[in-house]
Each structure stands twice: as structure tokens, then as C-alpha cells.
Image (cartoon, rainbow, N blue to C red):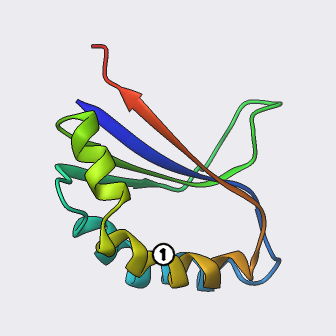
Amino acid sequence: MFTRSALFLGRIEEGREAEFFEIVETGLVPVWRRMPGALDLRVYRPRRAEAGAPPIVLMQEIDYASMAAVEIAEASPVRAEGAPVVARLMTMFVGELRHVVYERQA
């Protein structure tokens, strides 16, 4: 099992938090659910972190059966549909978006 995650590291501009998460819910979640080969989707909004933790605003995880399935999804036109939505989010977000692919070990 492989999981591709997206990490929004930074902060949302003050007063735009509700707008940010509404766009995630209505604009990105539907795209993420349609990713080819996606087995499961999880979206996390941190509520507490230890001192010194990175400033994670949002974390998304999508599970795939194989690395080949991850690569197909990454090249998919469905993924491209999310790009303008992410660009809109980035207008109210100060930070960076990073992706990591994990292989489940246990």
C-alpha cells in the first residue's frame, strides 16, 4: 500500500480560515475522491501540535495499491483539475505545499 500526501506548511491569512477550508471541502475533496486508482482519502486539520512541530495547516492522504497507481494518478487529467483550486488556495495561504509518497510498513 502506498499513500501520497499533501502538506500545507505555513499559515492561512488572518480572517480567511473559513474560506480556505470551504474551498478545500467543496473544490478539492471532490477532485481527490475521483483520482484514478484512489482507494481511500483522508483530510486532516491539525488541532494541537507539540512545541517545535512544523506549521501544518492541512494534510491530505490518498491511498493507492502500488507505486505505479500513484504515478498514474499524478499524471492524470483529474489531478490537473485540482490545480486551479490549489492556485486559489495559495492566494490566501503563506507557506509551501509539499508532497510525500509513503509505503506502508505495518
Q: Position of residue 63 (x, y in %)?
A: 26, 43
Asked whether 28 or 16 is in front, the reply is 28
Q: Position of residue 6 (x, y in %)?
A: 52, 52
103 sits left or right of 89 in the view: left
Residue 70 at x, y percent in the picture: 30, 45
Pick the residue in front: 35 or 106.
35
Closer-to-camera residue (8/99): 99
Q: Is residue 80 above or below residue 4?
A: below
In the picture, measured across the screen, residue 48 lies left or right of residue 68, that is right
Which quadrant of the figure has residue 90? bottom right
| Identity of the residue drawn at 30% across and 66% down | 76
Q: Residue at x 39, y 81 (%)?
A: 81
| Residue on which the image places disc 1 | 24
Relative to 97, residue 71 above or below: above
Give the quarter of the image for residue 105: top left
Image quarter in which the C terminus is found:
top left
Q: Residues within 10 Å of mark 1 (few under 14, many from 20)?
A: some
Indicate the secondary structure of the residue bearing disc 1. Answer: helix
Residue sticking out furthest to the top: 106
